[in-house]
């Protein structure tokens, strides 16, 4: 590990305040990586969802799930990920944030077997195409690819995550059907 610590000045200040500096240093040394090792690459290849966190140029945040068929997130190499941005609600909050503030945080969780999570943080950019990367959903509804350069990759431990089960997962990728999307679910007249 370099002389410069990962993370923010704020987290380092709080580590001092809460007397967790040694614990944090062990985590940085043992669990934080600047690239995706083989185990992380296999883990990502098996996921069907992740949570994407972004912030605009003023620091206003957005966090939303991204789902796709197994392998929809491609590990281009040990320092690069890419995923297709499927058709959604048309707002483009995450993509707009990346355009203004080109950083993203992706959290992958294995809800079904290990309950382990993997955080991947780094610069992100929008791309029309990425050589050698294909969309396993085979849909023409993809608007853009998001490419993420890995600066940090680290575990989210399993101790507080529930184990879930999944019986069937074959959604109609890219649909605009309002009933399937349940667009009005939180409308006052639906509650």
Image: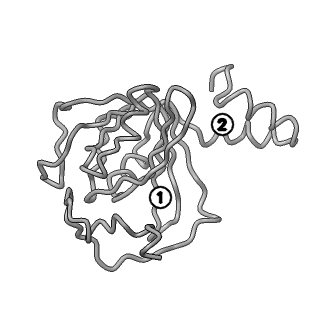
Disc on the earlier residue, 1 or 2 = 2
Q: Are marks 1 and 2 in contact (CB under 8 Å)?
A: no
Q: Residue at x 38, y 33 (%)?
A: 96
What residue is shown with label 2? 28
- Drawn side of residue 4 relative to residue 119, left or right: right
Q: Which quadrant would residue 97 be assigned to in this image?
A: top left
What whole-number distance in Å separates the C-alpha atoms at marks 1 and 2?
A: 20 Å
Q: Nearer the viewer, mark 1 or mark 2?
A: 1
For mark 2, does the 10 Å Cα neighbourhood hold few (<14), some (14 to 19), or many (20 or more) residues? Answer: some
User: Looking at this view, is 29 or 111 the one in front?
Assistant: 111
- Image height of 74 relative to 55, above or below: below
In percent of width and height, residue 104 lies at 46, 36
What residue is shown with label 1? 109
- Drawn side of residue 141 relative to residue 2, left or right: left
Q: Quadrant of the N terminus?
A: top right
In percent of width and height, residue 41 lies at 37, 46
């Amino acid at each position: 590990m370099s002389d410069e610590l990962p993370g923010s000045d704020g987290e380092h200040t709080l580590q001092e305040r809460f007397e967790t500096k040694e614990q944090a240093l062990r985590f940085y040394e043992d669990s934080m990586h600047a690239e995706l090792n083989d185990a992380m690459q296999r883990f990502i290849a098996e996921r069907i969802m992740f949570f994407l966190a972004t912030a605009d140029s003023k620091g206003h945040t957005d966090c939303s799930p991204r789902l796709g068929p197994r392998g929809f997130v491609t590990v281009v190499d040990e320092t690069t990920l890419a995923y297709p941005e499927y058709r959604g609600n048309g707002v483009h909050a995450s993509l707009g944030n990346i355009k203004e503030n080109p950083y993203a945080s992706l959290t992958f969780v294995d809800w079904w077997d290990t309950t382990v999570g993997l955080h991947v943080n780094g610069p992100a950019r929008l791309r029309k195409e990425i050589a050698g990367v294909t969309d396993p959903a085979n849909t023409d509804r993809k608007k853009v690819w998001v490419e993420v350069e890995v600066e940090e990759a680290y575990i989210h431990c399993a101790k507080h995550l529930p184990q879930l089960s999944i019986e069937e997962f074959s959604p109609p990728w890219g649909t605009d059907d309002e009933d399937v999307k349940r667009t009005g679910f939180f409308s006052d007249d639906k509650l």
